[in-house]
Amino acid sequence: MEIEAAKYIAAGLAIGLGAIGPGIGEGIAASKALEAIGRNPEASGKITPLMFVSMAIAESTAIYALVIALIILFG
Amino acid sequence: MNLSISLSPDILFYIGSFPVTNTFFWSIIITIFLILIFVLVGQRLKDKPSKLQNFIEILIEEAYSFVVSVIGPGKKARRIFPLVATMFIFVLVSNLIVYIPGQNAVSIDLGAGPVAIFRAVMSDYGLVLIMTLIAVITTQIVAIAVSGPFKYIGKFLNFRSPMGFFLGLMDLVGEIAKIVSLSFRLFGNIFAGEVLGMVMLFLAPFFVPLPFMFLGLLTAVVQAFVFAVLTLVFVSMASESEA
Amino acid sequence: MELFDALGINGKILLAQFINFAVLVFVLWRFAYKPILKFLEDRRKKIEKGVENSELAITKLEEIAEKEKEVIIEAKKEALNLINEAKDNAEKRGQELIKKAQEEASLVMLKEKEKLNQEKIEMFKEMKNNLSELVILAVEKVIEDKMDSEKDKEIIKKALKN
């Protein structure tokens, strides 16, 4: 296998596999937040920004995967 | 397939030896636009507000009350508010300006092939990196101001026990990871949106890109919000640590 | 690093972007956020003051209305008192007037009576004189002769006295 091809495969795998965890995690965060809003609609103003922040932090892992993929491709 | 996806912004022209990229060009235009609108409103406040003044008033009031709700009222909120609000407004406007229709097609040719004049401003990693650096350095300054320089360094270099040393190193890595995650989050989302939109337009030009555009609009707003809020949260955490 | 090159990171552009963003933050803070936040705060205070003023005005209006009621009640009382006094006065006056009138009337009546009496007396006197003359004339006519007047007079006087 050529090294160039291996690089592309590795980059694809890195971002693909790295996106699984955050995807599940963000889904859980969103579902829980919506559940909480459903139970207590008045608190939606407080829950929504917190949900976004925690989802953003959960997303960090995917972003590290993206960085790794970029490094593999261009580094 | 003539899909031209470049990670870096394209250089439009040179001023002396200074390369003007398309994102830099647009960030300057957005800056001037924002300054014009805000200064116009801010210097001519009327008791009976116009629609624009009303909108900006609501925006600033809501942003300020949000900042107060996170960091608490008083001097801290007033100090950090300009930075966070400007980040939010700047990122939001530069994300939304992409959705002005028709701009993807405009390009100029200055010798080295056609170059698109328009490009999502936040898909320039340099700009995002600079904003992230500003946010993180502000956080460090706040932390130093709150806990003093020696305590601040002691948090990262702890020689009292191997465990403490290890944890200190982890803190250091965490601070650097903040830069990476904060900048690549915004850059990655906007760049991915750009690429996705381009691919979809290429594959099926009619109607199919619409849902992705809606998703992109949502992303544009949410990412602007997240970037500003994370900065705010970092700063408020730094200002509260061991206070 | 090649990655930085791939991302298009250039020191000059970074510096330019930094200055750009810093200017944006400064200008927006100095010329937009500050005046707008101050303006909003002022307006909030103004509205607060307005609400306070309106509450004050309402309480004052209520006070004034109560005072008005009190004043009206007092005025009514006073008016009643005045009317009663006036009535009393009028009655007293009337009675006094009636008394005076009665007194005057009685006085007048007395005077009239006296006058009448005097007139009567005078009339009697005159009548007596006249009568005596008439009697003298009649007697003279009857008797006519031979009687001198002195004797006559004496006789008549005696007769009259009796």
Image (tube, coloured by chain):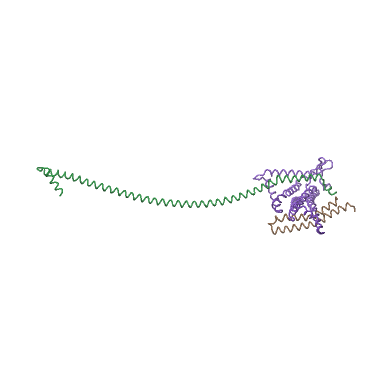
- A68 sits to left or right of B146: right
Task: Residue at the far left: name it.
Answer: C146
Choose between B76 and C139: the one closer to the eye: B76
Badge count = 0
Q: Position of residue B149 (x, y in %)?
A: 77, 52
Where is residue B227 shown, x and y percent of the image?
Answer: 76, 51
B139 vs C70, nearest the viewer: B139
Task: Please identify the quadrant where the C terminus of chain B is shown.
Answer: bottom right
**What residue occupies the far right of the structure in this picture?**
A1
Q: Is residue A36 left or right of residue A16?
A: left
The outermost residue toward the top is: B16
> Residue C114: percent from the left, percent from the top?
26, 48
Q: Position of residue C83 (x, y in %)?
A: 43, 51
